[in-house]
Image: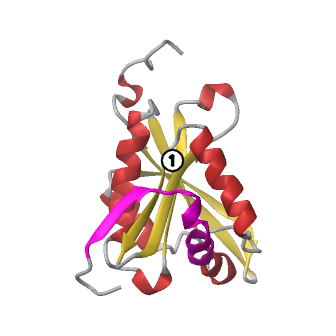
Amino acid sequence: MSAVAPLAVRPADPRDVPAIAAIYAPHVLNGLASFEIEPPGEPEIARRLAEVRARGLPCLVAEADGRVVGYAYAAPYRARPAYRYTVEDSVYVAQDCSGRGIGRRLLERLVSESAATGARQMVAVIGDSANRASIALHAGCGFARVGLLPAVGFKLGRWVDSVLMQRALGAGAAAPPTGGG
């Protein structure tokens, strides 16, 4: 991707599964942002994408020069019914495209589209308290650090923290959700 290539953010669709799997795999194998140990194959990525879409939640890709260079999606934060207005975000960018604002474009759009679904809170569970890029990305998009879970994962031979960040969507907690709750 050239430094000046226009970036398009659009809904992900099944044709994006190979690119999403290819972007995610190095993060799983070599990084601490994901607590998965083995990269999921394309069938599992397709299943996850279909599940997010079936729930009416956004799943986006960033495309430049005809290549998918990043993706983001919102998923339910937890399964129990009282959490139904809270989503968790995931944002991943191709390693050769980091630092170009792709993650920010994806997250800004994800926040907007998640709010449009009626979600009221978005939570980021960031692997590795030393993950300055992800922490800064989320802070720049209005998230506040709300907690730290020390040493909750063990990966690549060491204990890894999770940083919890959160932001309100729409009216947030200022009013009950539409339709009661």
In the orientation shown, which residue stands out farthest toward the top? Answer: 180
- At 69% from the left and 81% from the top, the residue drawn is 29
Residue 114 pos. (x, y %): 43, 41
Dot 1 crowding, Cα within 10 Å, few <14, some 14–19, many 20+: many
The picture quadrant where one finds residue 18 is bottom right
Q: Can see residue 76?
A: no
Label tally: 1
The picture quadrant where one finds residue 81 is top right
Q: Which residues are magenta?
A: 6-23
Image check: 85 left or right of 152?
A: left
- Judging depth in this view, the residue of 157 and 179 nearest the camera is 179
Image check: 35 left or right of 74?
A: right
- At 60% from the left and 46% from the top, the residue drawn is 52
In the orientation shown, which residue stands out farthest toward the left? Answer: 4
- Judging depth in this view, the residue of 48 and 174 nearest the camera is 48
Q: Which residue is mark 1?
A: 123
The picture quadrant where one finds residue 79 is top right
- Quadrant location, the C terminus: top right
Asked if residue 147 lies in the magenta stretch, the reply is: no
Asked if residue 21 lies in the magenta stretch, the reply is: yes
Residue 126 pos. (x, y %): 55, 62
- At 26% from the left and 85% from the top, the residue drawn is 3
Residue 131 pos. (x, y %): 50, 73
- Quadrant location, the N terminus: bottom left
Three-letter amino acid code at disc 1? Val
- At 44% from the left and 29% from the top, the residue drawn is 118
Residue 28 pos. (x, y %): 66, 75
Q: Secondary structure at mark 1?
A: strand
